[in-house]
């Protein structure tokens, strides 16, 4: 395992406090990574916290929230009752398919239907952002500028690299078998162990 090999090579990191962080889809995986390490029972691996931002913990709950959130966020000026009704119907079907996601008969339709549910609300405002509710039109992804600074890239040990706010290539590879898995039980596992967990949504 990578982490155990890492500790073997750099023993000075043994038994240090480990805090796992993740945002969006990364917040879906962070609890899995932390849980897997915790189950090893290695005294040199001390997980003391989780920080999850706008995390994709429960796909079903997330998709259920899109129609109402699209209205409550006030980012729409062109949304109509027809668009909202269509989105709600697709979202309801998405939730039904998630409940039987392990059945191969329905699996091929799952992502397509759920993506259409999301895309329907986007059609009213292509610039809509489910993560942020800004008061102006500023670019919310300032971290792209930050990691583009030469001194930051030098510190990270990377050659001149163009970073993207969201790179879907990696995500698309895992989506079919992972997108709608529920990672909230892993969070509950750490809460039961009195590990500190910070969760928040938005910017």
Image (cartoon, grey):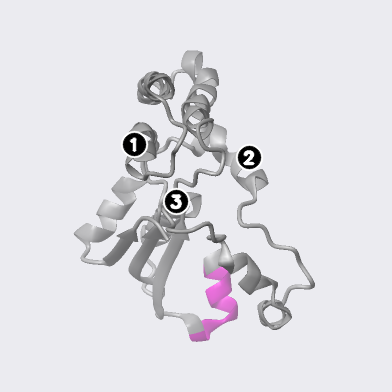
- Of 49 and 45, nearer the camera is 49
* Segment tinted magenta in the rendering: 4-12
Instruction: Tell me the distance, in whole angstroms, between the alpha carbons under discs 3 and 2.
Output: 22 Å
Mark closest to the chain's N terminus, 1 or 3: 1
**Structural crowding at the residue carrying mark 1, measured as other residues with C-alpha within 10 Å and reported as few (<14), some (14–19) or many (≥20):** few
Query: Which corner quadrant of the image does residue 33 belong to?
Result: bottom left
Query: Above or below — where is 149 with respect to 83?
Result: below
Q: Quadrant of the C terminus?
A: bottom left
Residue at image point 79% right, 73% down: 159
**Mark 3 or mark 2, which is nearer to you?**
3
Mark closest to the chain's N terminus, 2 or 1: 1
Instruction: Tell me the distance, in whole angstroms, between the alpha carbons under discs 1 and 3.
Output: 12 Å
- Of 56 and 101, nearer the camera is 56
Q: Residue furthest front?
A: 77
> In the image, residue 148 lies at what x, y percent?
69, 71
Q: What secondary structure characterizes most of the magenta part? A: helix
Q: Secondary structure at mark 2?
A: helix
* Residue to which mark 2 is pinned: 173
Residue at image point 35% right, 37% down: 71
Q: Secondary structure at mark 1?
A: helix
Q: In this figure, what is the number of numbered marks?
A: 3
* Residue to which mark 3 is pinned: 131
> In the image, residue 48 lies at what x, y percent?
32, 72
Seen in the image, is 44 located left or right of residue 169?
Answer: left
> In the image, residue 139 lies at what x, y percent?
57, 60
* Residue to which mark 1 is pinned: 65
Q: Do the CB atoms of the residues marked 3 and 2 lie less than 8 Å apart?
A: no
């Amino acid at each position: 395992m990578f982490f155990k090999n890492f500790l073997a090579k750099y023993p000075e990191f043994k038994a240090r406090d480990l805090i796992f962080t993740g945002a969006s889809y990364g917040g879906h995986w962070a609890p899995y990574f932390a849980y897997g390490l915790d189950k090893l029972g290695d005294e040199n691996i001390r997980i003391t916290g989780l920080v999850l931002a706008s995390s994709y913990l429960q796909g079903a709950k997330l998709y259920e929230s899109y129609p109402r959130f699209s209205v409550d966020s006030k980012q729409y000026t062109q949304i109509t009752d027809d668009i909202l009704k269509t989105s709600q119907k697709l979202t309801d079907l998405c939730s039904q398919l998630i409940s039987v996601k392990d059945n191969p008969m329905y699996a091929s339709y799952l992502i397509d239907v759920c993506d259409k549910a999301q895309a329907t609300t986007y059609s009213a405002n292509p610039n809509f952002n489910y993560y942020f509710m800004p008061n102006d039109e500023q670019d919310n992804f300032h971290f792209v500028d930050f990691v583009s600074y030469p001194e930051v890239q030098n510190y990270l040990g990377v050659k001149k690299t163009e970073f993207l706010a969201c790179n879907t290539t990696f995500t698309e590879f895992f989506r079919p078998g992972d997108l709608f898995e529920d990672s909230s039980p892993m969070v509950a596992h750490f809460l039961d162990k009195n590990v500190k967990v910070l969760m928040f949504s938005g910017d």
